[in-house]
Image (spheres, rainbow, N blue to C red):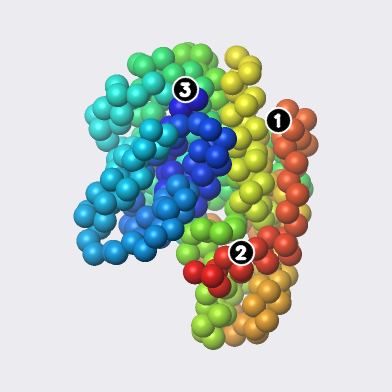
């Protein structure tokens, strides 16, 4: 099978590409190497995902990406340096490949940056996603997995969060764009019979995690003996989900789509284990065997108080079974971080 992954050089995407290649499939990676975080990190992710562990000499972004494309190209893997906002550029990819299923992970991420740049988030997360659906319609591709987010639940008072809960009250532009993707996705399913699963990811962490995210950021700052920004009183809590469990959930969603028709489903992928900020910090300190220096700051606009996934639907529908508890997940992450 040939799978097109958007954002295949990112955190989740590079792990997914690696697993699909191990399973004997072909991967088309579409990534624009956005400056949201270091393009060098994305190059390292890509090389790791294809099993290339030789030294890479960084010099200039455009030249480096050209070199990466050349290194990575094989019968089973091809990388396109492409922005999903450019429909014409995307269409050249669709023309040149027989695509069986699309896994759409590319997005502008982050709650706080979306408050500062809402129009750009709409361009990428809404218009970019619609470009893909338009091309699915034109090229008769009817299997599609889309990355949504636990952020759509906002400050939902009902715990744990279930897919049947009302999500009409997002509290950030990022969350609103993800809710928009779910709603417009249903339109394309209804009108053009595109079988679709929208996966609501709950705070994914693990090796290759984005450097700006809390676990990675805290680990780096503590290891360097620097002060960490600690927002609020430490009681905000997240359903942290280890990357291997997320990849397992995506692979099982792929299998479900391939074996069923008339599908439109929204599915939570989480661990169903809630860890508050203070606990998270304590586990990282223990894994590093080093104390943190905290700089206590007020809560940030757009941040939710708590996330907690009801994963009963995922278990029943696709056989999802997360098995990495937070302590072991952090241990694995810290081991990877210290090897870098």
| SS state under label 1 | helix
For the residues labelled 2 and 3, the Cα–Cα distance comes to: 33 Å
Task: Answer whether labels 2 and 1 touch (C-beta < 8 Å).
Answer: no
For the residues labelled 3 and 1, the Cα–Cα distance comes to: 19 Å
Q: Which mark is residue 318?
A: 1
Picture residue at 75% right of the left edge, 49% below the top: 323
**Local crowd size for mark 1, using a 10 Å CA cut-off: few (<14), some (14–19), many (≥20):** some
For the residues labelled 2 and 1, the Cα–Cα distance comes to: 27 Å
Which residue is denoted by mark 3 in the rendering?
100
Residue 331 quadrant: bottom right
**As displayed, is residue 47 above or below residue 144?**
below
Picture residue at 63% right of the left edge, 45% below the top: 246
Horizontal and vertical percent position of residue 224: 51, 83
Horizontal and vertical percent position of residue 55: 37, 63
Picture residue at 30% right of the left edge, 45% below the top: 69
Q: Is residue 132 visible?
A: yes
**Local crowd size for mark 2, using a 10 Å CA cut-off: few (<14), some (14–19), many (≥20):** many
């Amino acid at each position: 099978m040939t799978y097109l992954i958007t954002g295949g050089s990112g955190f989740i995407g590079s792990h997914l590409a690696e697993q699909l290649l191990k399973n004997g499939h072909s991967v088309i990676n579409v990534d624009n190497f956005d400056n949201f975080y270091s393009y060098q990190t994305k190059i390292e992710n890509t090389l790791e995902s294809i099993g290339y562990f030789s030294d890479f000499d960084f010099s200039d972004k455009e030249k480096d990406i050209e070199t990466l494309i050349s290194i990575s190209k094989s019968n089973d893997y091809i990388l396109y340096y492409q922005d999903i906002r450019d429909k014409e550029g995307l269409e050249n990819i669709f023309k040149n490949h027989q695509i069986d299923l699309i896994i759409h992970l590319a997005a502008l991420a982050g709650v706080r940056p979306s408050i500062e740049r809402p129009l750009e988030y709409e361009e990428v997360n809404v218009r970019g996603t619609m470009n893909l659906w338009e091309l699915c319609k034109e090229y008769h591709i009817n299997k599609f997995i889309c990355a949504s987010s636990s952020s759509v639940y906002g400050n939902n008072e009902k715990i744990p969060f279930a897919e049947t809960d009302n999500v009409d009250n997002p509290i950030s532009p990022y969350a609103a764009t993800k809710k928009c993707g779910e709603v417009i996705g249903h339109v394309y399913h209804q009108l053009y019979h595109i079988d679709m699963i929208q996966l609501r990811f709950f705070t994914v962490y693990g090796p290759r995690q984005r450097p700006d995210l809390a676990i990675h950021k805290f680990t780096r700052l503590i290891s360097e003996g620097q002060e960490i920004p600690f927002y609020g009183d430490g009681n905000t809590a997240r359903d942290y989900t280890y990357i291997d469990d997320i990849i397992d959930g995506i692979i099982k969603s792929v299998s479900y789509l391939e074996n069923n028709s008339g599908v439109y489903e929204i599915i939570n992928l989480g661990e169903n284990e809630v860890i508050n900020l203070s606990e998270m910090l304590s586990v990282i300190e223990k894994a590093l065997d080093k104390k943190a220096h905290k700089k206590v700051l007020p809560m940030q606009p757009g941040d939710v108080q708590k996330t907690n996934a009801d994963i009963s639907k995922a278990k029943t529908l696709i056989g999802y079974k997360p098995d990495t508890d937070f302590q072991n997940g952090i241990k694995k992450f810290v081991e990877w971080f210290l090897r870098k």
